[in-house]
Amino acid sequence: MNTLPPATFDAFRDHGRPRASLEENLEGARATMEALEQIGIRMDQVTSDLLKQGVKLFAEAFDKLLNAVDRRCKVKIGGEVNPQTLLLPPDLRKGVEEAAEDWQIGGKVRRLWARDASLWTGSDEARWLGWLGIIEDQIENKAHLENLAAEIKQAGFRHALLLGMGGSSLCPEVLKKSFGKMDGFPELFVLDSTDPAQIRAVESKIDVAETIFIVSSKSGSTLEPNIFKQYFFERVKEKVGARQAGSRFIAITDPGSPLERVASEDQFRRVLHGVPSIGGRYSALSDFGMGPASIMGIDAAQFLDRAEAMAVACSHCVPIPNNPGVMLGLTLGELARRGRDKVTLIASPGIADLGAWLEQLLAESTGKQGKGLIPVDREPMGTPQSYGQDRLFAYLRLQTAPDAAQDRFLEQIAAAGQPVIRIDVIDRMNLGQEFFRWEIATAVAGSMLGINAFNQPDVEASKVATRKLTEEYERSGSLPAEEPFFSGNGVSLFSDAANRNALGSRADLAGYLRAHLDRIGDGDYFALLAYIQMNEAHEQALSRMRGAVRDRKRAATCAGFGPRFLHSTGQAYKGGPNSGVFLQITANDAADLPVPGQKYTFGVVKAAQARGDFQVLAERGRRALRVHLEDVESGLKTLESAIGEALK
């Protein structure tokens, strides 16, 4: 069967004459072809272009036909979608347009929604695409979220503390920091660190007897949530008694997990189930995000209704140029293939923590097989001259509370020729739209990079290394001994043999840091991996170090607090492009905390996580150096001063 476009049919009816003309005047035809070649017209290129145009027209018509009979394409977008603007230089815009044409001709958006694993690597991707339908499922079953909110409000809890890591904790943290405390509902806090000082700081903010604890873990076997639960379950028993302790706990986990069994044994108040076909970082709109949202007083039904507008806008029924999630993903993927893989995130202060959620989604989804997007969050704003040609800026602007300095900065950056994606978030209740937009975009970018966007092969390596160290501590009562290759002024340096040899012999801390920072080349990034308490003062200190390195080296800079980044950007650092130069920061704990039922303490777990992290970085051939501080506060000042000296 073949087809004839209506325009061709009409033209033939108007002036066509049927005859056997294929073999007429062959010599004249050859002469014509030679003449065309001489004046620069290549018929092979002409026919290739005609083929592309013909296939494109056929694909467009076929899409319209399929959409006409697809009941899902009858759904209209309900509600306003956060606007998106792509400010791209002409050469980059052309590349994105060509990528869009390829996706249209290949019917790839339809294949994505059909859960076609061959769009990525053809392995197990189809098993992890449950998030595509989660909004509709949640809206249909919204009563369980409404009942949860009413129950917790009626119980009168003053505080809620979520205990989780990575995909289980980052969405609730975004909601907590974006919405704050909601009237009549408990104030939500999030714990995702084994640092003893941070655990104490969080505990000091809550009334243990008046707190509902949310233990959140998809697998139910993740180390950190399990030991957080052990610690706080004992604390609750001390306050309200063993018989009442379970009623102060809720679990969010996949059906049949070890955590669900623990919840049953300890008589938890409730168990909310995750969806097995949704990975942690794609779970924001499942109960992993919407359960805590309901507990803290957000109207989950309205939040999901707003998000549904984005899901409809990103469907296969919408032409690619008008599809916000797909166009974002095509931009991310195409620019990454051109070397612009440092996705620099800038968000309005009112939604600033959205960057932390995006970090995990982008890094853990795409950073593997030596490829990937490197998210750059919370880097201090510089001048246009501070940035190299490896950047793509993404500006998430809260329309109800924009920041004038950020507006001016992005205008300058775009005027300087840097590519900028601008997304105007209408209000905080539209954050769900961004969760879905960026999930679609990440899946699209992963397809363009040729990787599985839904696994995290290198995260497990750090977990295995940590497990070996904690098991060693349980057996022997100590971690393996280690020797620094430099010590002075309360600071010691550690590294593996290859990195140690690359640094050579230096006279002082600044000398070693200079040698390490001189390893940063064009297209590289610098990352501070800080296993210390995450607080404002420490973040500001790391920010100043980042700014100094960025301005001197014109390199993108990242910073993460351990161990939380292990469940986020850690995948890209180990499995992504070998373009990172890493400075790990560890420190002595002023006061440790015991883990009930274990020999090891929270401080020992954190130390084991840091060592395991460094071990895997070294095994992957990464450029890494560890700085150990005897005292955190004075040590950070010493380190900042030494970095300043090293950059002179």
Image: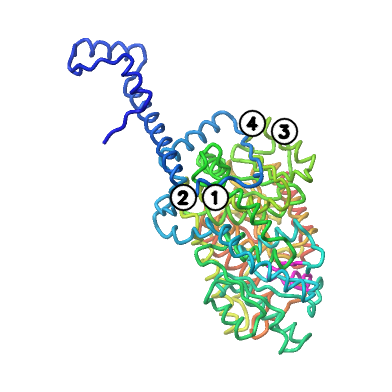
From this view, report whether residue 638 is shown above or below residue 5: below
Q: State the extent of the magenta-drawn residues as a range.
A: 188-203
* Label located before the other in sequence (1 or 4): 4
Between discs 2 and 3, the one toward the N terminus: 2
Residue located beneath label 2 in the image: 112
In which quadrant is the N terminus drawn? top left
Q: Residues within 10 Å of mark 3 (few under 14, many from 20)?
A: some
How far apart are labels 3 and 4 at the CA level?
9 Å
**Is disc 1 in contact with disc 2, using a CB cutoff of under 8 Å?**
yes
In reply to whether residue 194 is colored magenta, the answer given is yes
Q: In this rendering, would 323 be left or right of 420?
A: left
Labels 1 and 4 touching (C-beta < 8 A): no
Question: What residue lies at 54% left-to-right and 63% top-to-bottom?
Answer: 459
Residue with the mark numbered 3: 412
Q: Where 470 falls versus 516 (above or below)?
A: below
Colour mapping used in the image: rainbow
Sequence order check, earlier mark of 1 and 3: 3
Image side of residue 66 versus residue 92, left or right: left
Residue wearing tag 1:
440
What kind of residue is marked 3? Answer: Gln
